[in-house]
Image (cartoon, coloured by chain):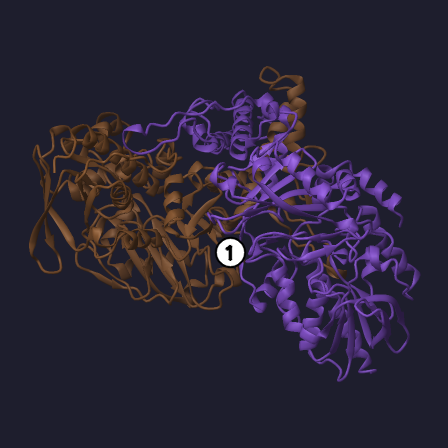
Chain colours: A purple, B brown
Amino acid sequence: MTRRELFKMIGMAAGGAAMYQAMSTLGYAAESPFKGPIDLSGAPKGASVLILGSGVAGMTAAYELRNAGYKVQILEYNNRPGGRNWSIRGGDSYTELGGYTQHCEFDKGLYINPGPWRIPYHHRGLLHYCKILGVPIEAFFQINYNAYLHSSKAFGGKPQRYREIKADYQGHVAELLSKATRQHSLDDAISKEDAEKLLESLRSWGALDKDFKYGKNLTSSERRGYEKDPGGGLTAVPIPSQPMGLSDVLDSGLWQGIPSGDNYDMQTALFQPVGGMGRIGEAFGRELGSVIRYNSKVTKIEQSERGVTATYVDTATGATHSASADWCLCTIPLPVLAQIPMNVGQKMAAAISAVPYASAIKVGLQFKRRFWEEDDHIYGGISYTDLPITNIGYPNCDYHSPGKGVLLGAYIWGLNAMEFTAMTPPERVMKAVEYGSQIHPQYKQEFDNGVAVAWHRSPFTMGCYGMWSSDARAKHYEDLCRIDGRIALAGEHASYLGGWQEGGVTSALDAIGRIHQRAVAQGSKA
Amino acid sequence: MTRRELFKMIGMAAGGAAMYQAMSTLGYAAESPFKGPIDLSGAPKGASVLILGSGVAGMTAAYELRNAGYKVQILEYNNRPGGRNWSIRGGDSYTELGGYTQHCEFDKGLYINPGPWRIPYHHRGLLHYCKILGVPIEAFFQINYNAYLHSSKAFGGKPQRYREIKADYQGHVAELLSKATRQHSLDDAISKEDAEKLLESLRSWGALDKDFKYGKNLTSSERRGYEKDPGGGLTAVPIPSQPMGLSDVLDSGLWQGIPSGDNYDMQTALFQPVGGMGRIGEAFGRELGSVIRYNSKVTKIEQSERGVTATYVDTATGATHSASADWCLCTIPLPVLAQIPMNVGQKMAAAISAVPYASAIKVGLQFKRRFWEEDDHIYGGISYTDLPITNIGYPNCDYHSPGKGVLLGAYIWGLNAMEFTAMTPPERVMKAVEYGSQIHPQYKQEFDNGVAVAWHRSPFTMGCYGMWSSDARAKHYEDLCRIDGRIALAGEHASYLGGWQEGGVTSALDAIGRIHQRAVAQGSKA
C-alpha cells in the first residue's frame, strides 16, 4: 500500500474525533477474553518456534512457549524490548525515518509514553503479565472533573472545566425530559408508574430543584462547582455559580467530551505501570534474557514443509545471519512486514496489505514546574481541545513533586498527524507549545524541552496501529489470523482490540494455542 | 443534648442515603476557600496560644502560630496525634466507651481509616499541608465501573455492575428525550436549531443507534460491556450484551448510585495519603514534637481578662495539671466540649449544644486473599448496597499484591448505625461479613479478622462529625465561630465542610487569623 492510499483512507475518516468515534463503534476498544494462563502441556520434545518482534505479543508468546518446553528465539529490530510498549526518558535517543535523532533531556524520573499509556481493568491478559512479572501498577485518571474541555470556537476560546459542561448538559437534559414527562408527551412510551419514578430519578441525577428546574442554586453548584466555595469559620458561606444555558452547551460542541470516561476502554479503573508503560516491556525483556536477539533486522522469511528460516541483518555489524525453527510466529507490524519477502499464500499476503495504519503523533513537553497542579489544581487526567493537539495529558504520578514535570502535550490524529509528521521534531514540539498555550498560558514562560514521536516515521512500525475498516475485516481478518503452513501472525493488528496491548496479548495466546495444537498433532519434526 | 434528642435528630433523616443526600444538599460537601499560606506577620513578642486537641484543625493552627512566633502548646486526650485523622494498623489497640478493647490483627502494611478516607482535589488547604509535610498522595477511586450497585429488592438480589446501570439509564433517558424532541413536544422549550444539536448529542452521549434507539448492539456494549468480549486471533469476535429495560432500572432504585462520582466532593481527582489517612496526622505530630502534650484530658477551661487556663488530667498518671496562655483555640468536638465546664457567654454555649453528631460506623475486614481483584476484577473504588453496610470499599493501593487484603466492609449511617453501636465490636464485624457475603460470596471462605469503630463510642469525639440542620446553622453558626473573650473554636464543626478535614483546616486558619488580629491590636499581654 502506498502512502497516497493510506492518506486517502485516513482522509475518509474526516479528522481525529470522527476516526476515534469510528474506532469505538467498530469495537476496537473492549474487554479481553483472557481467562487465565494458557495450557500448552505436552509440547513435543525439541520443537522450536522462531518469533519475530519483541513487542508485547512476541514476548507473551515467547514467555509461554519457553515455559511449555519449546525452544524459542526472538529476533528484534530495536536495541530494546517492548516495541510500542515504550517510555522515553532523559538520556534516551531516538532516530526516526528520515534520519532525525532526538536526545531526550527530561529530568531524572520523568518520561513520556509515545505508544500505549493506559490499561483498562478488563485487559486481563496484560494485567496478568504485569502481576507475574512484578510490574507495579498505579491509577490513571481518564476523567478529571477539574480538567478542561476546550473549543477554539466557543466561549471566546476560554476553556471550560469538565465538571461545568457535564453538570450543565446533564441538568438541562434532565429538565427537558422532566418537562416532556410531566406534560404527558411520553405517555405512549412509559407507564404512569414508571413516569413517576423517572421524575424522581431525574431530579436527583440532574441536580434539579423541587420544580424540576436546573438553575443557579447550591444543588447545581454541588455538581458544577461554586462561585465562592464553602469554607470554615466566619468566612465560610458558599455562593452558588451560574449554570450555562442549554444553547451555549450545545453550540460549543463540548458535550462530545462528556462520555469519554464512559467508554468501556476508558472506564475506571484504568492503570499505568509505575515508572512508565515501558516497564512492562523491560520486565519481559529481563525475564527472557538471551532468548531475544536485538539489532536484528529481518529481511526475508522463508518456509518449507519442514520449517521456517528468517534471514536478518545485524544492524550493529552489518553482517547477515539466519535463524530457523519448526514454526514461526511473526508479530512484525504490517507496514513493515509488507516489505519483507515471505512465501505465504495469496490470502495472507492480501490480508497483510489490507490494513492501513493510524497516523498518530505524541509530543512530550517538560516544564520548569507543575503549574497545572500549582495554579490550575489539575492533578492527573486529560484536557480535550478541538485544536490539532487534541489532548493535554497530565502526569498521574508524583503529585506535588516540587521539580519539573512532563505533560503529554499532544496526541494528534488523522490529517493533522500527517501535517505534523512532515515537520521536524523540534517544529512539532514548538507547535504543540503554541497550541497548548491557548489552554495553559503558563506554557510560554515555563516550557523547558520536548520530544515528539510521529508513528509513521517510526522505523519499526511505520504507523501507530492497524486500522481495520468493517469491509476489510469481513474480507481479510480471518486470512490474516489463520496459520499459513508454518507461519502464524500475531499483534494488535490480528485482533479486535486494535491499538491496545491486550490485542497483542490475546492474539499471541490464540496463535500459539493453534501452533501448539499442530505441533502436538505432528510430533516433533526438529 | 441528650442521647434521646440526638437519636430523634438522626431518625428524622430517615436512614443513611437520605441523610447523605441532605448533607450534600445543605452544602456540607464542597470546595475550600484556601488561597495559600496564611500571613500572620507581626505577632506580638511573647504572645501565647493554648490549643486544645491535636486533630487536623489544632495542628494546622499550632503549625502556623508557632511559625509566626507565638508560644504554642497543644493538649491532646489521645496518646497519638491526628484525632479522626487516623489509620488503624496491625498491632494497634483501641478502647471504646464502655471499655471494649480491640486489638487489630491486620497484616503488615494493611490498614483501615475509621475516619476520613478521601481528599478531593479542591481541598486545597489539606493538600497544601500534605505537600509541605512531605506526605505523598495517591489516587482514590470513588467510581469503579466494574464495582457493584446492589439492591436486596431488585434483580433477585444479584448485584449489578455500575457500568450496566449507568449505561442503561443514560441510554433510556437519551432515547426518551430524543423521542420527545423528534415528535416536537418540546418546541416551546428549545429552538429548531438547538433541537437538531440536542439530537446529535443524545445519540453520542446515550450510545443510541442511527434510529435513536438504545438497544442490543456493539454501540451500547461499548458502554455497558459485552456478552463476549473482543479479543485476538480467530476467537476474537465480540458479542453484544442485552441492556435492561427502563422499568427494571427505575424499579431497582439503583439509579441513585449513578451520580455519586458527580458530586463536587467525590469528583475525580480524589486522593488518599500513601499508607493511610493517618499519615497526615503522624507527619504533623512529628513536625510539632513537644508542642503536643499527649494523654491530657481537659476537665475545665477558664478565661479571664488576661488569659485562659485549661485544667487537665494526665491519663497515664492520674495527676491534675493546668496550662495557661493569652488565647485559647479549642478544637474539641462539641459532644465532648459540651461536658467540659467553660466560662463562655450564653450564645457560644447554646451553639455548642445545638449540633448533633452523625453516628457513623466503619468496619475494616481482612481477607486471606484479594478475591475482589482476582475473581471479580474490581480494582479499588466502592460498591454500594441498600443493606445496612451501605458501602464496600476496595483498597486503592497495592494492586495485585499476593497476600491478604483489607476491605472497608461497612460504612453505616443513621438508625442502622445506632443498632450497630449497641453491638460489641466482634458482633459488628460478623454482621458486616454476613451482609457483605450477599455481594461477595467469597466472604465466608476468605474472612480472616476485623475491627469496627462506632464513632458514638469514641471517647475523644462521641460522634462522627457535626450535623448542622439549616435552622441550627442560621441560629447558631456565627455564635459558634465568633471569638468569645479569649476563646475561639475550630474544627469541621465550625465550618460549612462538615465531616471533612478541609473544614478543620479552613476553620482553624480563619480562627487564628482573627486571634492574630486581636493579639496584634492588644499587643503582648503575656
Residue B181: image location, x then y, percent: 63, 23
Report the residue marked by disc 1.
Answer: B379
Residue A32: image location, x then y, percent: 65, 57
- Name the amino acid, label 1: Tyr
Residue B238 versus residue B212 in the image, above or below: below
Residue B70: image location, x then y, percent: 21, 41
In the image, taking residue A302 as reference, residue A389 lies left or right, namely left
Foreground pick, A489 / A82: A82
Indicate the secondary structure of the residue bearing disc 1. loop
Quarter holding the C terminus of chain A? bottom right
In the image, taking residue B394 as reference, residue B517 lies left or right, namely left
Asked whether residue A50 appears in the rendered view, the answer is yes
Residue B369: image location, x then y, percent: 46, 67
Residue A80 versus residue B128 in the image, above or below: below
Disc tally is 1
Foreground pick, B148 / A394: A394
